[in-house]
Image (spheres, rainbow, N blue to C red):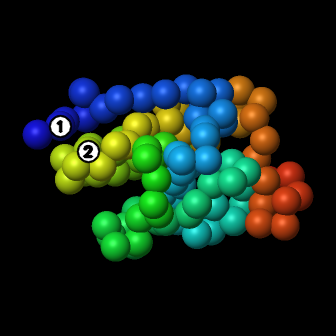
Amino acid sequence: MLDQTTIPEITPVEASAHTDREVLLDVREVDEWAAGHAPGSVNLPLSRLHPDRLPEASRLLCVCRSGARSGRVVAALRNAGYEAVNVAGGMNAWQADGLAVVRADDRPGTVI
């Protein structure tokens, strides 16, 4: 059983270079995602997370605001046999690293 201390992580910069076979899965709530998210990310809130709703991907790159919620998601997904990693520091770190944060209309967004 995978616990929080053994969650595999990647940096936001590494996650921003994800391939077409990987999915950047944002597990924040809809209002958080709408305010600002990583371009190309898929929103599937933790409150609605279910294996039937997961996008097809060779690897799921999971992100939330700080990395805590997405860390729990990664642990659960890996325990269920999925290839998943946590984006270290979440969207706060993503924005701090100077990476783009956008709203649904592609205008600049903000992390809430």
C-beta proximity under 8 Å, tags 2 and 1: yes
Residue in front for this viewpoint, 111 or 13: 13
Report which quarter residue 26 is drawn in.
Answer: bottom right
State how far apart marks 2 and 1 are (Cα): 7 Å
Instruction: Give above or below for 11 relative to 38.
Output: above
Instruction: Tell whether 58 sits left or right of 15.
Output: left
Density class for disc 2 (Cα within 10 Å; few <14, some 14-19, many ≥20) is some
Q: Quadrant of the N terminus?
A: top left
Furthest toward the right, the residue is 107
Q: Pointer 2: what residue? A: 78
- What amino acid does circle 2 point to? Arg
- The residue lying at 53 percent from left, 46 percent from top is 22
Residue 44 location (% of width, % of height):
49, 65
SS class, disc 2: helix
Q: Which numbered disc, 2 or 1, marks the residue closer to the eye? A: 2
**Relative side of 59 to 83, left or right:** right
Q: Which residue does the image show at 79% across and 53% down from the upper left?
A: 102
Residue at 77% in and 30% down: 98
Q: Is residue 72 visible?
A: no
Farthest left residue? 1
Q: Tell me the element at label 1.
A: loop
Q: Locate residue 36, reporting x and y percent.
A: 72, 55
Task: Tell me the kind of residue under disc 1.
Answer: Leu
Q: Position of residue 103 (x, y in %)?
A: 78, 60
Residue 46 appearing in the image: yes
Name above or below for residue 101 compared with residue 12.
below
Q: What residue is rendered at 42% in x and 29% in y?
A: 9
Q: Position of residue 104 (x, y in %)?
A: 77, 66
Query: Which label's residue is closer to the chain start, 2 or 1?
Result: 1
Taking 92 as reference, is 105 left or right? right
User: Toward which corner of the image does residue 18 lie, by quadrant?
Assistant: top right
The residue wearing badge 1 is 2
